[in-house]
Image: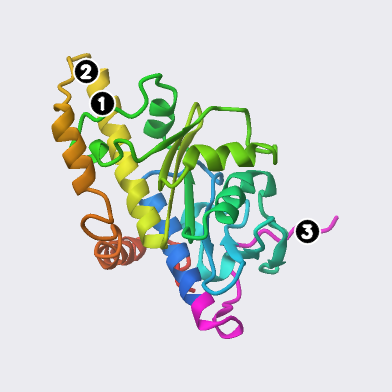
Amino acid sequence: MTKMKYDTHFECVKNTVSEQEWNTRVELAACYRLVDLYGMTDLIYNHITARIPGTDHLLINLYGLLYKEITASSLVKIDVEGNIISKPDTDYGINKSGYVIHGAIHKAREDVSCVLHTHSRAGIAVSAMKCGLLPMSQTSIRFLNHIGYHVYEGPAIDLEERNRLVADLGQHDAMILKNHGLLTCGATVQQAFNTMYQLEMACQAQVDAMASKAELDIPSSQVLERTAHLYQPTTRRPYGVLEWPAMIRYLEASSNKLDYPRYDT
């Protein structure tokens, strides 16, 4: 019986790829680790994809690894259709059917370099609420009129769903996949992660507040509109960029306690 190769330690590819690709690999691997660190993972499922600058190629995780196991060298290089260009020497592959969502957005949005999708507990809970995300906290008001909604059509394996996904996202950087989970995207890995973090925090706060059964206090429409405007990246600054070095320091400190390969290897 042939033994399958399901290792989690991979040969470093730093010297075999361009500097731009390696930097993207390190940033994306860090993003995977941070999503795990903040408790937004779902076993081996979901994806975070990043475009390699100056190319039509993307990086994605091996299907079978935990987010805390992902390294810069374990990522798979694919084209926008999900075809594998290069991958580590392992029997792990990619979940191509789950790539439908990512592929649709990368093809339609040239301004997007990173797409992040989660099945967090709070995100799923809010995705099943008819009211959607409520503007009940400063964090959630950020998304007022700046978030899309996509009706659940079953597991995302139908290529015809792509057009509807793209239309529902529009020019937003966040979307709630009804009865499914959360999605964010951004011009950089840092921005996509920050948007997901804020969306997750908004969902957690809403679930907690609604569970208390207390009457919710929603600010006036004028305050909501002004606050939503002030918190847009184009109004203030691109979110995630300033925060990223601090996130890396937090990741570095936390990684020292784990028996896993460094993310930047």
User: Which element is circle 2 on?
Assistant: loop
**Is the residue under label 3 in contact with that under label 1 (CB below 8 Å)?**
no
Task: Tell me the residue that label 3 is attached to.
Answer: 3
Q: Nearer the viewer, residue 164 or 34?
A: 164
User: Which element is circle 3 on?
Assistant: loop
Identity of the residue drawn at 48% across and 67% down: 261
The amino acid type, in three-letter code, at marker 2 is Ser
Q: Position of residue 200 (x, y in %)?
A: 34, 40
Name the magenta segment's main secondary structure.
loop
Identity of the residue drawn at 55% across and 50% down: 105
Up the image or down, 238 lies above or below 150; here it is: below
Asked if residue 147 lies left or right of residue 209, the reply is right
**Is the residue under label 2 in contact with that under label 1 (CB below 8 Å)?**
yes
- First to last magenta residue range: 1-21
Number of residues whose C-alpha sits closer than 10 Å to that of mark 2, classed few (under 14), some (14–19) or many (20 or more):
few
Q: For the N terminus, which image quadrant?
A: bottom right
Task: Tell me the residue that label 2 is attached to.
Answer: 212
Q: Position of residue 217 (x, y in %)?
A: 15, 22
CA distance separating discs 3 and 2: 52 Å
Task: Tell me the residue that label 1 is attached to.
Answer: 208
Nearest-to-viewer mark from 1 and 3: 1
